[in-house]
């Protein structure tokens, strides 16, 4: 983990939830998905395509901010 992803990545978060046998709260899923879609919209407007979008390239901040990486 780096200072840019102080809460790890979405893949790690999913694995933690599986281990606890718990689902994500619906509002958390909506928040993550909204931020991911807005980030993709932003980069697409700049004519940038993310060719490897997957959960381990979605970085999470403790503040609740989602960042895309590995372009």
Image (tube, grey):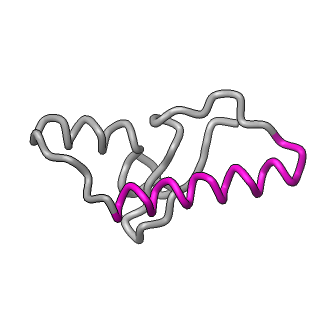
Q: Horizontal placement of 9 versus 4: left or right?
A: left
Q: Horizontal placement of 46 versus 7: left or right?
A: right
Say above or below: 66 vs 63.
above
Q: Quadrant of residue 7?
A: bottom left
Q: Is residue 42 magenta?
A: yes
Question: Which residue is painted at 57% across and 52% down in the image?
Answer: 36
Region rendered in magenta: 27-48
| Rendered location of residue 26, percent (x, y) | 31, 59
| Rendered location of residue 47, percent (x, y) | 89, 45
The answer to which of 31 and 62 lies nearer the viewer is 31
The answer to which of 35 and 60 lies nearer the viewer is 35
Q: Quadrant of residue 21?
A: top left
Question: Which residue is painted at 56% across and 60% down in the image?
Answer: 35
Question: Which residue is painted at 79% across and 37% down in the image?
Answer: 49
Residue at the limit of the structure toward the bottom, as seen here? 63
Residue at the limit of the structure toward the top, as seen here? 52
Q: Could you tell me which quadrant the C terminus lies in?
A: top right
């Amino acid at each position: 983990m780096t200072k840019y992803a102080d809460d790890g990545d979405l893949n790690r978060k999913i694995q933690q939830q599986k281990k606890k046998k718990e689902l994500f709260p619906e509002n958390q899923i909506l928040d993550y998905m909204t931020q991911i879609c807005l980030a993709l919209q932003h980069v697409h407007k700049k004519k940038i395509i993310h060719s490897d979008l997957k959960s381990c390239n979605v970085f999470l901040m403790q503040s609740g901010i989602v960042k895309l990486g590995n372009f």
